[in-house]
Image (cartoon, rainbow, N blue to C red):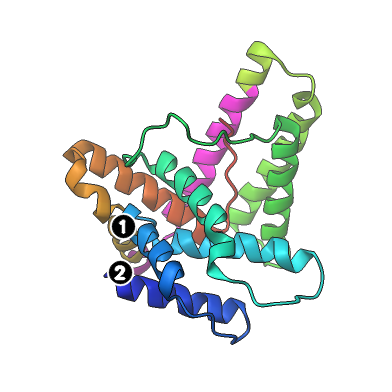
Amino acid sequence: MNVAEYCREIETYLCRKNEGHLIRVVGPVFEMVSRWAAQGVPLAVACKGIDAYCERYYAKGPRRRPVRVEFCEADVLELFDAWRRAVGVPSAQSDDGEAAVVKDSLPVHLERAIARLTALRAGRPPDAFDSRIDETVRELDRLKTSARQARGEARTAILDRLAALDADLLDLARAQLDDATRADLLSKADAEIAPFAARMAPDARASAIDSAFSRLLRESAGLPVLTLS
């Protein structure tokens, strides 16, 4: 996808978010979105940044004006930085001077994970995957009881268990993929990493593609991130 196509996709996506009201990506806004493309911001990540801004905007009450692309830039770049760190692709700039990320407390993180998994489970006929989700929710609820006071080795033990639970859910979701869906997710993962491939060693590129695949799989399955760094 070239820069012009990238900008058109952003324009079209924002038009849908604004219920048909077209906000043109031209002039300084075109330059801003072009920088996203040049930095390698995946289109899916940019759209999620737009979603994040729109969700906060809608939560304030009836909309008074259409959402403009430039309002969403901070969310887009924040999500891109999180994506870059998650999949391990190199950054064009040093981590020095990057804005600090405020991390959730462990109890809050657990509460959000429980809420996401419970919502995912609701309204669906039970199967093996849903049974595993139910088991995970029960365990997270038990962990939440001790998380507030957990320090040192106790907190590390909870974080290690969260990583194991997260991996188990992803493995189960991966096992349920059909061949067509697996190939589609792998193609998308490869496309996400492609802008960075020339700067990466083969093993680093393979690792980044695998991480991107896991992220796409998580989104496809609707699974929250259980790990907390």
At mark 1, the secondary structure is: helix
Q: Earlier in the sequence, mark 2 or mark 1?
A: 2
What predominant SS class does the magenta segment belong to?
Answer: helix
Amino acid type at circle 1 is: Ala
- In magenta segment, residue 179: yes
Task: Please tell me which residue lies in front, 86 or 161.
Answer: 86
Task: Please tell me which residue lies in front, 83 or 183.
Answer: 83
Q: Are marks 2 and 1 in contact (CB under 8 Å)?
A: yes
- In magenta segment, residue 21: no
Rendered view: 135 above or below 34: above
Task: Give the left or right position of residue 217, taking residue 101 as reference.
Answer: left
Residue 200 pos. (x, y %): 21, 40
Residue stretch rendered in magenta on the structure? 158-182
Q: Residue furthest top?
A: 152
Marks 2 and 1, how far apart at CA = 8 Å
Residue 142 pos. (x, y %): 77, 32
Disc 1 target residue: 38
**What is the number of the mark on residue 191?**
none
Q: Which residue is depicted at the point 49% across and 51% down? A: 77
Q: Quadrant of residue 157?
A: top right
Q: Which residue is depicted at the point 57% across and 58% down? A: 222
Residue 22 pos. (x, y %): 54, 84
Amino acid type at circle 2 is: Val
Task: Give the left or right position of residue 39, taking residue 106 as reference.
Answer: left
**What is the number of the mark on residue 3?**
2
Q: Which residue is depicted at the point 44% across and 56% down? A: 216
Task: Give the left or right position of residue 74, taking residue 61 as reference.
Answer: left
Task: Please tell me which residue lies in front, 92 or 19.
Answer: 92
